[in-house]
Amino acid sequence: MGKKGVSPLAVILTMRGKTQQEIADLLNVRRETVSNWMTGKTPARLTLEEWSKLANFLDMTLEQLPKSFAPQPINDSQNQNQN
């Protein structure tokens, strides 16, 4: 059975010790905009330059960034299969 999803960006921010406000400042958007991306309310519509800035800021490659920041379902069986 699936559980409520979590934003991949939220996971990355936690792992990197970064905040929504820092992402907002970097990309010249409001913090609420970043929040909307993370809740799935609106998709992130970034230019290639903005994606690159974000990847650099998070110490990631473009390929490592999630394609969507919206919450992704968490499936218990996925966690159990990895053990």
Image (cartoon, rainbow, N blue to C red):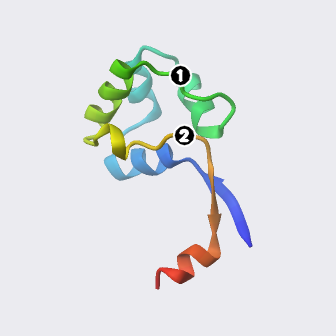
Q: Can residue 26 be seen at all in this image of the molecule?
A: no
Q: Amino acid at mark 2?
A: Ser
Q: Where is the N terminus found, in terms of image quarters?
A: bottom right
Give the structural element (helix, strand or loop) at label 2. loop
Q: Can residue 56 be seen at all in this image of the molecule?
A: yes
* 36 lies left or right of 51: right
Front in this rendered view, residue 32 or 44: 44
Residue linked to disc 1: 45
Counting residues from the start of the chain, the first of labels 1 and 2 encountered is 1
Location of residue 76 with respect to 68 vertically, above or below: below
Check contact, mark 1 vs mark 2: CB within 8 A. Answer: no
Location of residue 51 with respect to 17 vertically, above or below: above
Front in this rendered view, residue 9 or 82: 82
Q: Amino acid at mark 1?
A: Arg
Q: Quadrant of residue 35?
A: top right
Q: Residues within 10 Å of mark 2 (few under 14, many from 20)?
A: some
Across and down, in percent, residue 2 comes to 71, 67
